[in-house]
Image (cartoon, rainbow, N blue to C red):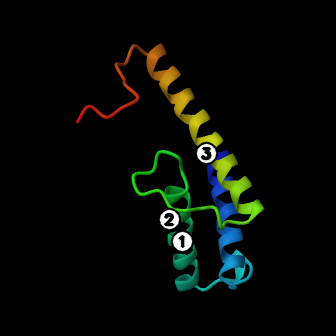
Amino acid sequence: MLAIKAKREEIAAHVAQDLGLGDLAGLSREDRAAVDQQTDETIEGCTADSPEAADCSDADRTMRRLLSEHRALAEQQADEDNTRLAEQGEVFATKDDA
């Protein structure tokens, strides 16, 4: 979980730079909130299974790499969670039951 959070911070730092806001540590509360929102939207919109996938082809090479690494970490975490649940005898499915 820490690795995913660290990767998200890397993405946020890149978003802040893209927005022309500079370093994350020096952002105002409002600017940090804007960066966090843009970071969430970028991560959610640029995933392969996103219901409203964004066109991320204009993302620079660094952002595409960061998003790919974040996606891999998220998938690894999901696999570990599923394995742990299976070992505990929990019933689970990869799709929502709803």
The one of 95 and 85 positioned closer to us in this rendering: 95
- Taking the spot 68% from the left edge, 85% from the top edge, the residue there is 21
Q: Between marks 1 and 2, how big is the CA–CA gap? A: 5 Å
Q: Secondary structure at mark 2?
A: helix
* Furthest residue in direction left, as rendered: 98
- Taking the spot 73% from the left edge, 53% from the top edge, the residue there is 65
The picture quadrant where one finds residue 31 is bottom right
- For disc 3, the neighbor class at 10 Å (few under 14, some 14 to 19, many from 20) is some
Q: Quadrant of the N terminus?
A: top right
Q: Between marks 1 and 3, how big is the CA–CA gap? A: 17 Å
Q: Which one is earlier in the sequence, the residue at label 3 or at label 2?
A: 2
Q: Position of residue 75 (x, y in %)?
A: 57, 36
- Taking the spot 52% from the left edge, 77% from the top edge, the residue there is 33
Q: Secondary structure at mark 1?
A: helix
Q: Position of residue 66 (x, y in %)?
A: 71, 55
- Taking the spot 64% from the left edge, 49% from the top edge, the residue there is 70
Q: Position of residue 62 (x, y in %)?
A: 77, 61
Question: Is the C-beta separation of discs 1 and 2 under 8 Å?
Answer: yes
* Residue 25 image label: none
Q: Is residue 98 left or right of residue 83?
A: left
Tell me if residue 51 comes above or below residue 35 in the rendering.
above
* Residue 38 image label: 1
Q: Which one is earlier in the sequence, the residue at label 1 or at label 3?
A: 1
Kindly identify the amino acid type of the residue bearing the numbered disc 1. Answer: Gln
Instruction: Quickly name the residue at label 3.
Output: 71
Q: Position of residue 73 (x, y in %)?
A: 64, 41
Kindly identify the amino acid type of the residue bearing the numbered disc 3. Answer: Arg
Kindly identify the amino acid type of the residue bearing the numbered disc 2. Answer: Glu
Tell me if residue 96 comes above or below residue 7 in the rendering.
above
Instruction: Quickly name the residue at label 2.
Output: 41
Tell me if residue 21 comes above or below residue 5 in the rendering.
below
Q: Secondary structure at mark 3?
A: helix
